Amino acid sequence: MSLQTRPKNTVETGKRRFLNRMIAVLIGGMLLDGYILGIVGPVSSAMADELQLSPLWEGLIVAAALLGILAGSPLGGWAADKWGRKPLFTFDIALFTVASAMQFFIDSPVLLLVARLLMGIAIGIEYSVGWPLMGEFSPTRLRGRLLGAMNIAWYGGFMMAYLIGYLLNEYTEIGWRFILGTSTFLALLLFIARLGMPESPRWLFSVGRRDEARLLAQKYLPDDALSDLEHEDVRKGSFAMLFSRQYWRSTLFISGFWFCAVAPYFAIATFADSVLHQYGLAGGLAGGVGLSAVALAGVVITFFLIDKLGRRVLTVPTQWLCAVVLAVIGIWGGAPPAVVLVLFLVFSFFNAGYTTLTGVYPAEIFPTEIRGIGTGFATSISRIGAFVGTFLMPLAIENLGTSTTMLIAAAVAFAGAGLSQWLAPETKGMSLTEAAAGYTH
């Protein structure tokens, strides 16, 4: 029986089941990203002691995954736009599984650095494929929430990893290698779940494979995305298009916004224990998980509001607020510990809220032919910020002091707020074709 003659209810049920599966495997990829970055914090001391790591080596290993993302994102985005989403979608999780399993057998800082770097490359590819896929398969009315749900998974993975890592490190004798390697089990399950997933009809249409695209679209796409498919341009994308007259503002906004959003967060969250101790606050489980839990709450609330209030209203004001909060922490050096803790929690909550938009905007305002490379390039720029924050945080605290370090973080946040005030667009309720066709704010 063809799709045209199958009962409508059967077709719609099949589409819903597929969308649920797609959501699950894409969210799983983001959860893994948060997990591998969060799992390092609780075991960093034990790892540094056994491997006799200098502060330089410790910073490099903690930030290695971010460096991998820096390289993997643009390469993965370029490959996804050239050869399709499906091949990269399977390859990245296979690479991640192998690299993660290497952590069970670490015997030197170099091997650990290589394993974490390969995992980062895999996650970078995931970024440049996962968000475009979610945008290309989502119904318009739910697109913001579904893209935002991937950030819920990231923060959930980060918090879950910190909690698991802390408990295993404190109350068991299994060792830091096994704790780091726990991401392998999640990766293997995700690899199996992704087998047999289809290619994106939008990508097929954009490269001229229209008949194949229409067949897959009828089987998998929601009705509004199905009708919008016919408005898809058939043209070859290129890296240079990111800086063309039509798209340079999109590229500048997404890259700069993302950089300024994640640099302060990664620095504070990764070294939450050290940062909180500098202010006379308890670190450990309560500190690290507490900041991550509040951040997760910010993402969840943004998830519920994004398709109701829109993108811009959730992007601009909260960035100004976070910049002010970090400035207060830096200027008020003698603030009571309770006040400092509240300010850190406020920052974590609202920063996570607008960081959710860093996954939504790339999938919406880049056209299909450069959606992968555009997302990959912006991801790469953002990971420069995350790497700088993670790598320099312990060095800055040691050499400049905590107050100056927080003021530097505030300056980065102010720069992001100004950029978003100027360029952040509104894409609520638009089809992907409409959102990528013009840049308005």
Image (spheres, grey):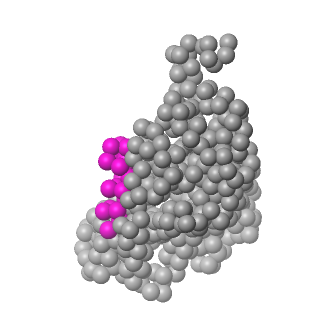
Residue range corresponding to the magenta coloring = 292-320
Q: Residue at x 62, y 46 (%)?
A: 233
Q: Residue at x 35, y 49 (%)?
A: 310
Tell me: 19 left or right of 417.
Answer: right
Residue 346, placed above or below residue 211? below
Expressed as whole percent of the image width and height from the top left, the position of residue 221 reads 57, 32
Residue 221, placed above or below residue 68? above
User: In the orientation shown, which residue stands out farthest toward the bottom?
Assistant: 399
Tell me: 178 left or right of 279.
Answer: right
Residue 72, placed above or below residue 156? below
Q: Nearer the viewer, residue 2 or 156?
A: 2
Majority SS type along the magenta span: helix
Q: Nearer the viewer, residue 102 or 298?
A: 298
Expressed as whole percent of the image width and height from the top left, the position of residue 265 reads 44, 65
Expressed as whole percent of the image width and height from the top left, the position of residue 436 reads 51, 52
Q: Residue at x 42, y 80 (%)?
A: 408
Q: Quadrant of the N terminus?
A: top right
Q: Residue at x 62, y 41 (%)?
A: 202
- 278 in magenta: no
Tell me: 269 left or right of 51.
Answer: left
Q: Nearer the viewer, residue 273 or 424?
A: 424
Expressed as whole percent of the image width and height from the top left, the position of residue 423 reads 41, 65
Residue 231 falls in which quadrant of the image? top right
